[in-house]
Image: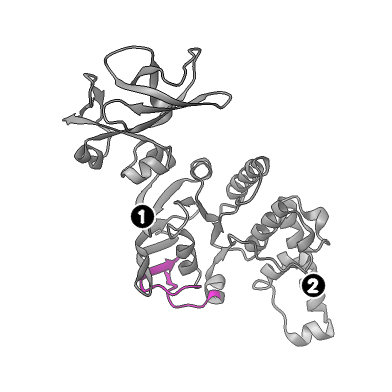
Amino acid sequence: MALLEVKNLGISFGGLRAVDRFEVEIKKGQLYGLIGPNGAGKTTVFNMLTGVYKPTDGIIKLDGEDLVGKKTIEINKAGIARTFQNIRLFSQQSVLDNVKIGLHNQYKYSALTGILRLPKYHKMEKEMNEKAMELLKVFELDGKADFLASNLPYGEQRKLEIARALATNPKLLLLDEPLSNLDTELRVEMRREIKELHQKTKVTVVYVTHDQSEALALADRIVVMNQGQIEQVGTPQEIYSHPATPFVAKFVGRSNLIAGTWSADTFTPAGSTACWEGSQVAPVFRESGHYPVKPEHLQVKRDGRDGVRASVYEIEYQGVEVRMMLHNQADNEILEVRYRGDETYRVGDEVTLTL
């Protein structure tokens, strides 16, 4: 049985259908990526899963328990914890106390015990301090336990928010854009730490991002959303190599959609005699007369007839590769190529593109 089961989930705000027919089944221990452009409905899905928004329709079950209509605190106690796109910490509390707040569902004592500082109070406070320090050590924050949360650098505040969410001992951890606003070096570091954390704790994670590279690097499976609906669900390899829709082809990996004609599993680009094998290409592309090709999969030649004739109009040197933008001479559509080689090209050159 799936840990999280979501069926036909949707929500409307007035006349706007923000999310429609969202469905997913997530097994225990998986790391799911939920990706899409800004405004795709990703955070709205999180808000429905955590009780911030009540769905207009649909089913949400965690370990078989129906969560629709429950309050946020009840859903948290059921086993869902989350972080937010905009960090929400108790800024005037210490780093240690922020994590201990997440532990209070597991360590309980009466108000009288706390007021009188009875032995049970001291025992539980000691246990919470030890557990909180363990979590802080995972994120290398144990040396800053006494700092105010507001005095941490931005990246460490992100880490603290994840530590606090983990303190609730969740069955399901929802991470909403955890690497946003971080510099490149810190993003790589955090990505590695999240992957290691998932491997160590085995906690089930849903990871929201608009950055495809993050999802491809981290996720076991990926859900691609656009305009409130699911475009495709699959492994990172399936999503990248075998897009099911034109949107996925463009959004994940920036595929070129080359026009031409299909004959069974063979594609011939417009204005060419080339024959490209296409047995793995989705039906939607066959119906529209297109062939999706990633920029790095196109080869550039000075001359040749068995390919797509194009003219170079922009070149960007990017270190290990050169990014070239070209006009397809058959239909004047813009194509992108990521080229590695010794040949030097210039704006205005006419070339042939092949697989």
Q: Nearer the viewer, residue 112 or 100?
A: 100
Of the two numbered discs 1 and 2 in the rendering, the one whose residue sits closer to the viewer: 1
Q: Nearer the viewer, residue 323 or 70?
A: 323
Residue most extreme to the bottom: 112
Q: Secondary structure at mark 2?
A: helix
- In the displayed structure image, the side of residue 121 where residue 286 appears, left or right: left
Quickly name the residue at label 1. Answer: 230
Residue 294 rendering spot, x and y as whole percentages? 39, 31
Residue most extreme to the left: 263
What colour-coding does the image apply? one colour
Q: Total label count?
A: 2
Quickly name the residue at label 2. Answer: 123
Q: Quadrant of residue 289?
A: top left
Q: Is residue 59 magenta?
A: yes
Q: Quadrant of the C terminus?
A: top left
Q: Secondary structure at mark 1?
A: strand
